[in-house]
Amino acid sequence: MKLKIAIPSKGRISDPAIAILEKAGLGLKDSGNRKLFSKTHNSNIDVMFSRAADIPNYVADGVVDMGITGLDLIKENKTEEDIEILLDLEFGQTSLVIASPEDSAINSIDDIKSGIVVATEFPNLTNSYLNSHGIEAKIVELTGSTEIAPFIGVADIISDLTSTGSTLKMNHLKVIDNILDSSIQLIANKNSYNNSVHENIQKKNLIDNVKNSIKGVIDADSKKLLMMNVSRKDLDNVKELMPAMTGPTISEVLSAKEDTVAIQAVVDEEEVFTLVNNLKNAGARDILVVPIERII
């Protein structure tokens, strides 16, 4: 039994997708060559490289069991009924927006009238959004350089992905409304994940193992492990400062010349700067701040 995971072969989410698999313990053996398939360090799991836009369909059709792709592409391909969204991978955040030229009289959704021409790489999402507002538009599907469409007479307005809005501003476009907020998702074929046949139970278990390992990477990303030595007389003061997940772990330091304990605790990365200085002032010493690879 093989589990196949589709990831983008190129583009802005390809390298982060590979990185999160590697951190989860599924290092790719052939990622440098960008072959169609790559084996991983788990003999039961292979990776397939594909266009990000094709991944929702491959997962929905059962060509692969799992995939990493954007929520925008999942919804554009109308594959939600046949896939299971397992995790938001918390990177690749972007928004699909409606934009018009800066000098246009179109400043809000209320200014858009039926018959308008819209250029986009997302015809289904765009048409559905406009229809929900009672607008019948002509959709011009493009595969790139959408921003230029209003200035060469191809369209009146556009719908396009943006993360910061800087590209739209640079091209003298203004955001009219937001269609969808998107980020990168870990998805699975619904049949592979929910079927109760024996082989599918094994596959579901493997899918859950992948999901849990990747979730562990995400959970660990904003955490640090603090380790320190503390004289027992200062222990209560130090314990009061520790915002650990389940309370600090305290153990005896047998070789110490004085009555000393070692403390370990997982804390939020954003707290480390202030916390380390407060701990030092409270009597902690030999303080180590250690990265965490995964939290399961």
Image: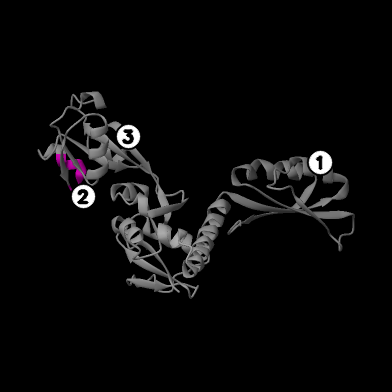
On residue 178, the disc is 3
Please name which of the two marks, 1 or 2, marks the residue nearer to the observer. 2
On residue 237, the disc is 1
Q: Quadrant of the N terminus?
A: bottom left
- Judge from the rendering whether residue 279 lies leftward or rightward of residue 179; answer left or right: right
Q: Is residue 221 above or below residue 243?
A: below
Which percent across, then down, holds residue 198?
A: 50, 69
Label 1 SS? helix
What residue did someone put label 2 on?
Answer: 144
Marks 3/1: CA–CA distance: 50 Å
Closer to the N terminus: mark 1 or mark 2?
A: 2
- Judge from the rendering whether residue 61 lies leftward or rightward of residue 200; answer left or right: left
Give the class, few, some or many, for how many residues have Cα within 10 Å of label 1's Cα (few <14, many ≥20): some
Which percent across, then down, holds residue 39?
A: 42, 74
Q: Amino acid at mark 3?
A: Asn
- Judge from the rendering whether residue 275 lies leftward or rightward of residue 174; answer left or right: right
Label 3 SS? strand
Instruction: Identify the magenta region.
Output: 142-149
Instruction: Tell me the residue at 70%/43% (across/down).
Output: 243
Instruction: Tell me the residue at 17%/46% (across/down).
Output: 141
Which percent across, then down, holds residue 23?
A: 52, 62
Closer to the camera, 260 or 124?
Answer: 124
**143 inside magenta stretch:** yes
